[in-house]
Image (cartoon, grey):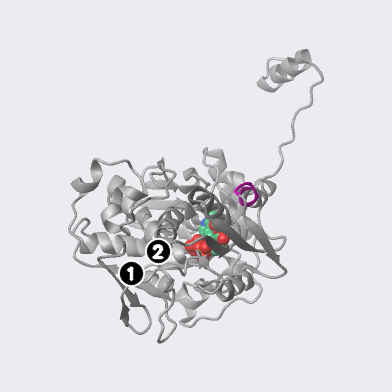
Amino acid sequence: MLEGYVLRCLSCGATYKPDPWLMRCPSCKGLLEPKLNDVEVSWEDFRGRKFGVWRYRELLPRVRYQVTMGEGGTPLIELKSNLFVKFEGANPTGSFKDRGMSVAISVAKEIGVKSVICASTGNTAASMSAYAARAGLKSFIVLPKGKVAKGKLAQASLHGATVVEISGSFDEALEAVIEASGKELGLYPLNSFNPWRLEGQKTLAYEISDELGVPDWVILPVGNAGNISALWKGFKELKSLGLIDRLPRLVGVQARGASPIVRAFREGRMEFFERPETVATAIRIGKPVNWPKALLALEESNGIATDVSDQEILEAQMMLGRMGIGVEPASAAPYAAYLNLLGREIGEDERVVLIATGHALKDPDIIPTPRPIEASSVEEAVEEIRRVIGRG
Ligand SMILES: Cc1ncc(COP(=O)(O)O)c(C=O)c1O
Ligand SMILES: N[C@@H](CCOP(=O)(O)O)C(=O)O
């Protein structure tokens, strides 16, 4: 199933025969990255197929049975000339995580795994529990108590996950998952240190290139830093396969109260945030597990790491909403950053793609409740409407 792949340690460069249970380099504990050898493909190979993750199957694990619900193939919406939103909220569970779960749960299923586990600020849990349910696997999730948006909790519950709430942050939840997962308890981990999950997420880069060509900039929110790593891997693979001839620059955006990658990018050394805080609960992460991959992606792409305030995030969420794009707070951070960078680092004539990572319905409580006009009868309702229109 993983033929054609070699696992390479990002820290020491050691290479390993791919083993789906191998998550870290056995010799130095570095992050592992799957490398594909000897593949030859052209855009024509892909283009007769349905738009979505598995369209690019030659560049993914060769599973016998795909656990799929039509993930990927999300809309690329033109906001204005040169500005596009890749709306990942249109995935089956409402976030980009579905790309990774489809692939990683297919791998898990093929090796006979019965139970899966993740730590989550909500979206990973929602996605994992849905795909696990499709595959007939049990799911266990560890969440930071009181810090997960309502819609995401509801999804995990609906899909039958066993939920452990930890009195602590996401980072502590992840520590618990790292300790509990493994062959001993038969719990297969599905956070983004699982390299096969990121193989699914790299298809975001394939789809953008397939539909639009290579933009000048791609801007995305950064939490545990898996998605920026996967996106960059996707673009680099296309270039080395000769399917694109240049690479975009990446902008990684974090909320100011949870911005260890931004600080490390500016100061050249990583110091974690012990008490991350932001309204954007999806990216309320102080110790991003993929930080070495993310910093490399930013450096190699000649990119930028930047932070935005909670107020900027909420304003950007509202502005996108008024343009018809409903996103959760974390997913509005790229638009806030774009507004800050436009006319400075980003030129007006440059082509930009914002990654809208999750749907607005994930976190309904953050959206101000409308103040309705009260009407006690049909006549009164019509009268009020006439009044508002100015014909009352
Ligand atoms: C909606 C949303 N946006 C962005 C992110 C950040 O992605 P990553 O953790 O891959 O950096 C997450 C989860 O972490 C998320 O749920
Ligand atoms: N925002 C994430 C945090 C976990 O990230 P992961 O990519 O490592 O699973 C979530 O939705 O839980």
- Amino acid beneath label 2: Trp
Spatial separation of the CA atoms under disc 2 and disc 1: 8 Å
Which mark is on residue 331? Answer: none
- Amino acid beneath label 1: Pro
Residue identified by numbered label 1: 34
Residue placed furthest toward the right: 376
Give the class, few, some or many, for how many residues have Cα within 10 Å of label 1's Cα (few <14, many ≥20): many
Residue identified by numbered label 2: 196
Q: Position of residue 119 (x, y in %)?
A: 58, 65
Q: Position of residue 197 (x, y in %)?
A: 43, 61
The magenta segment: 155-159
Q: Quadrant of the C terminus?
A: top right
Looking at the image, tell me whether mark 2 or mark 1 is earlier in sequence order.
1
Q: Residue at x 52, y 72 (%)?
A: 288
Most foreground residue, 61 or 358? 61
Q: Secondary structure at mark 1?
A: strand
